[in-house]
């Protein structure tokens, strides 16, 4: 009895090349937004699977979302989490809210969002709320327009966050903060008729 327990413990420890690498700590929080059971009709009956929608973020302007599919719920969640961490987006956060109003569209879903005053909280539906909380937004007003499909709402929220621009980025695009070249200031003015 004792030998079998010690053998099991030895098997659990990683060996070889995997044992040489330390486990990587995952940064940020993960939220499972939706889990759905799917069915495929085959000759012997039905084969069931699972689809999981997961949102991950670091709480300071970086967020990602993905769907994972597998025959077990935990495997689907793990797949979705790893895919979401590989495809995270960054967006500007100003005073724990977004810098300006925007609308994101994905499929038949649209999400409208607007900055809110401090203390307002996150006013949003389930899918959008998970994205905002993972990204570190504490005050925001949002409304879902069109389809209420959870997957499309999450992706529409991400599309809206992609369009956000900070004030510095907009001024740089307009050329407001670019200094005037020194040669243009010191050039002598041309005299007409001379």
Image (spheres, rainbow, N blue to C red):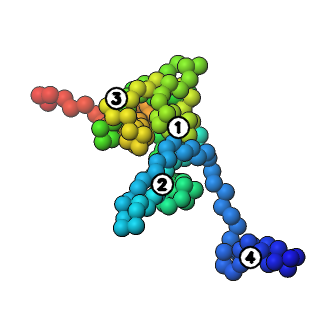
**Tag on residue 145?**
3
Q: Residue furthest toward the left?
A: 193
Please say if 82 is above or below 159: below
CB under 8 Å between discs 1 and 2: no
Q: Residues within 10 Å of mark 3 (few under 14, many from 20)?
A: some
Query: Badge 4: few (under 14), some or many (20 or more) residues near its Cα, within 10 Å?
Result: few
Q: Nearer the viewer, residue 171 or 194?
A: 171
Q: Is residue 32 above or below residue 5?
A: above
Q: In the rendered view of the protein, which quadrant contains the N terminus? A: bottom right
Q: Upstream in the sequence, badge 3 or badge 2?
A: 2
The residue tagged 2 is 50
Q: Residue at x 73, y 72 (%)?
A: 12
Q: Which image quarter is the C terminus in? A: top left
Q: Residue under circle 1?
A: 130
Helix, strand or loop at mark 2: strand
Q: Which residue is mark 4?
A: 11
Real-space Cα separation, disc 1 to disc 2, in angstroms: 20 Å
Q: Nearer the viewer, residue 117 or 173?
A: 117
Cα distance between the residues tagged 2 and 4: 29 Å
Where residue 143 sits, quadrant-wise, is: top left
**For the point 71% across and 74% down, which residue is it?**
14
Secondary structure found at label 1: helix
Residue 171 in view of the camera: yes
Asked if the residue at tag 2 contacts the one at tag 3, i.e. Cβ–Cβ closer than 8 Å, the answer is no
Quarter of the image where one finds residue 147: top left
- The tag earlier along the polypeptide, 1 or 2, is 2
């Amino acid at each position: 009895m004792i030998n079998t327990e010690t053998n099991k413990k030895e098997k659990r420890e990683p060996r070889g090349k995997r044992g040489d690498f330390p486990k990587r700590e995952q940064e940020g929080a993960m939220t499972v937004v939706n889990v759905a059971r799917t069915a495929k009709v085959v000759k012997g009956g039905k084969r069931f699977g699972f689809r999981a929608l997961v949102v991950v973020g670091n709480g300071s302007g970086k967020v990602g979302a993905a769907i994972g599919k597998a025959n077990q719920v935990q495997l689907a969640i793990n797949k979705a989490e790893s895919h979401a961490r590989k495809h995270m987006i960054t967006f500007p956060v100003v005073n724990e809210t977004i810098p300006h109003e925007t609308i994101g569209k994905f499929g038949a879903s649209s999400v409208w969002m607007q900055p809110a005053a401090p203390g307002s909280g996150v006013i949003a539906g389930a899918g959008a709320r998970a994205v905002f909380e993972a990204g570190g937004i504490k005050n925001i007003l949002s409304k879902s327009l069109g389809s209420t499909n959870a997957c499309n709402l999450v992706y529409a929220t991400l599309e809206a966050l992609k369009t956000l621009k900070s004030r510095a980025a907009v001024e740089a695009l307009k050329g407001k903060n670019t200094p005037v070249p020194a040669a243009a200031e010191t050039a002598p003015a041309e005299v007409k008729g001379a």
